[in-house]
Amino acid sequence: MFGLMLTGKETQEMEYLLKRELEELLLDLTDSRIDGIVKRAMEERYQIIFRMYKRFVNPKEYMKYVRHRQTSKADGTERKSK
């Protein structure tokens, strides 16, 4: 557990950084050239960043970034929606 106090401006900057990182990861996760193992690591990172982002914004904002997991054909594993 880690505590952090931010000013309003710092909070806005953190929201922006997390949002951009989520968008970049979403784009990369749709890239067919990326290997399944790498995508799994990216998915784990996405979930961590998404949980952080949820702490800074209202539900309407973070619902845009809810990721629905699908069956992965590349690595043969099945992923279920949460």
Image (cartoon, rainbow, N blue to C red):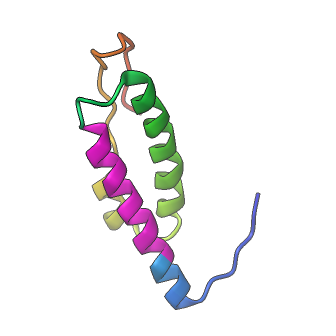
Is residue 71 in view from this perspective? yes
Note whether 15 is above or below 69 in the view shown.
Answer: below
How far across and down, in percent of the image, does residue 19 sit? Answer: 38, 64
Give the mark count.
0
| Nearer-the-camera pick, 26 or 69 | 26
Is residue 59 in view from this perspective? no
Quadrant where the C terminus sits is: top left
Note whether 42 is above or below 18 in the view shown.
Answer: above
| Nearer-the-camera pick, 5 or 21 | 21
Residue 22 position by quadrant: bottom left
Note whether 22 is above or below 6 in the view shown.
Answer: above
Query: For the magenta stretch, what is the residue range?
Result: 14-30
| Nearer-the-camera pick, 76 or 55 | 76
Residue 67 position by quadrant: top left
Look at the magenta stretch and give its main secondary structure: helix
* Residue displayed at 53% across by 65% down: 55
Residue 16 in magenta stretch: yes
* Residue displayed at 40% across by 73% down: 16
Quadrant where the N terminus sits is: bottom right
Q: Residue furthest front?
A: 33
How far across and down, in percent of the image, does residue 8 sit? Answer: 53, 89
Q: Residue furthest top?
A: 76
Note whether 18 is above or below 37 in the view shown.
Answer: below
How far across and down, in percent of the image, does residue 13 sit? Answer: 47, 79
Residue 64 in magenta stretch: no
* Residue displayed at 50% across by 70% down: 56
How far across and down, in percent of the image, does residue 35 sit? Answer: 36, 25
* Residue displayed at 36% across by 48% down: 25
